[in-house]
Image: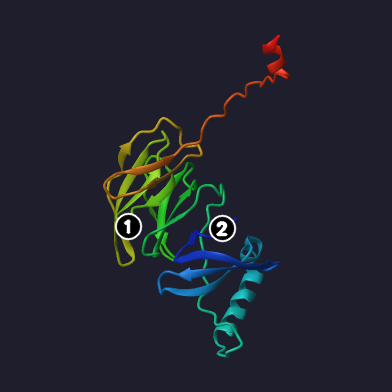
Amino acid sequence: MIAAGERLGPYEITSPLGAGGMGEVWQARDKRLEREVALKLLPSDLILDAERRARLEREAKVLGSLNHPNIATLHALEELLYESENPKLPTSFSPDGRWVAYRSNESGHNEIYVQPYPGPGRKWQVSTSGGSWPLWRSDGREIFYRAPNGGIEATPIDARGDTLSLGTPKTLFPLSTPESTDMRYSPVADDGRFLLIEPVAAQVSRPLTGVLDWTARLAG
């Protein structure tokens, strides 16, 4: 479930506008052109149905050809990538909105990949020994991710045109929590500082004993 404040590619979600059988409509801001837009998110069953998808694309072309003050202008028909196996593990878009990093187990185990957004284009494998929770550095020159041992690793990225040059992954620091733990992290500066949010272990509740008429007992 998307929420206000989240980001889908170049679009920053602002507030909900409506919902129905054909999807949800959100007010958003296109950060590329700095303009307000209405973003319609379609359900996955519609997108995965080839016939319904083709009909949608035909309707979008017709709508895009219209120019009338009482008809909404269609700016784009785009496909956004989601982490389908676990919604808690989001994809991560580059600061310029041109690339998306995501986790996939297509090789048999979880690895981090990068491909152009919105595509099409080839994809590059970023991690070499497993990874999850990808995040971009603020200047787009590195991708951070959780390693299988729970630590934070980084791979240098050099994007030129439609190609990527990847450096050697390096371990930034280890963590005592395993990769599967629902622990959030975020780089707060390019000097190596990170903010880590780790869930607190459940505490055992202790019984509470109440004493009635305690003043009378003290007086006696």
Is residue 118 visible in this depiction of the protein? no
Give the spatial CA distance, label 2 vs label 1: 24 Å
Outermost residue, front direction?
A: 219
Q: Residue tagged by mark 1?
A: 140
Number of numbered tags placed on the structure image: 2
Residue drawn at the location 71% of the way across and 9% of the way down: 220
Side (left or right) of 98 relative to 51: left
Image height of 89 relative to 59, above or below: above
Q: Which amino acid does the dot numbered 1 rest on?
A: Gly
- Residue 149 lies left or right of residue 61; in this view the side is left
Of callouts 2 and 1, the N-terminal one: 2
Residue 183 x/y as whole percent: 47, 39
- Which one is in front in this view, the residue at disc 2 or the one at disc 1? 2
Q: In the image, residue 17 lies at what x, y percent?
A: 62, 69
Dot 2 crowding, Cα within 10 Å, few <14, some 14–19, many 20+:
few
- Which is more toward the observer, 72 or 108? 72
Question: Which of the 4 image quadrants contains residue 71?
Answer: bottom right
User: In this orientation, which residue lies closer to the viewer: 43 or 45?
Assistant: 43
Q: Is residue 109 left or right of residue 141?
A: right
What kind of element bears circle 1?
A: loop
Q: Which residue is mark 2?
A: 3
